[in-house]
Amino acid sequence: MKMVIIEEFIPFTVPEIRERLDARLFVRLSHGKAKHRRMTRPNYGAEAKQGELWETEDSFEKMVWRNYVEQRMQFFEEGNVEGRMDAERCKQLGIVVQEGMDVEAQETLSWAVCAMLEALKGKCL
């Protein structure tokens, strides 16, 4: 058995790819946490050199976060990516959503391993 982990969201929106995934996990991230992570990376935010427009706070708002919202809004009630998930839509598509938002990495990893094992039950042998 082979396992491939894709840390990306676009496959959820492409039916031909989504249907080939045995486990579809959704980890939620708030605007504030996403911005903080992006802007505190080396060579981003205050450290961005002149001309590196994709690494500025303005580019985060206009490109990174806007794309995040556009790609994910269909899975939320009223398209609000920091609001309530559209549980029925996620269930129909077989997407398992982690409870909470901005959950710490260790807890997220533990949840993800359990969710993957649950999704793979009966497929391993």
Image: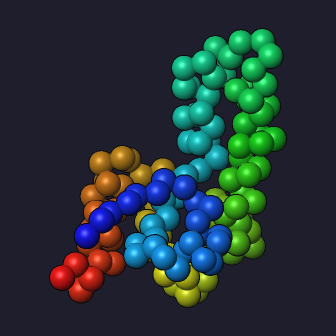
Q: Quadrant of the N terminus?
A: bottom left
User: In the picture shown, does residue 108 fall above or below 73?
Assistant: above
User: Whole-percent x and y of residue 25?
Assistant: 45, 67
Q: Residue at x 74, y 52 (%)?
A: 67
Task: Note whether residue 87 is visible.
Answer: no
Relative horizontal placement of residue 122, taking residue 42 as reference (left or right): left
Q: Nearer the viewer, residue 19 or 104?
A: 19
Q: Quadrant of residue 58?
A: top right
Q: How many marks?
A: 0
Q: Residue at x 56, y 72 (%)?
A: 17
Relative horizontal placement of residue 68, taking residue 30 as reference (left or right): right
User: Whole-percent x and y of residue 41?
Assistant: 54, 26
Q: Residue at x 75, y 60 (%)?
A: 70
Q: Quadrant of the C terminus?
A: bottom left
User: In the picture shown, does residue 96 fall above or below 6?
Assistant: below
Q: Nearer the viewer, residue 121 or 44?
A: 121
Q: Quadrant of residue 119?
A: bottom left
User: Whole-percent x and y of residue 105?
Assistant: 36, 47
What colouring method underlies this structural image? rainbow
User: Whole-percent x and y of residue 61?
Assistant: 76, 40
Task: Note whether residue 37 is visible.
Answer: yes
Relative horizontal placement of residue 34, taking residue 104 as reference (left or right): right
Q: Residue at x 30, y 48 (%)?
A: 106
Q: Nearer the viewer, residue 52 or 40?
A: 52
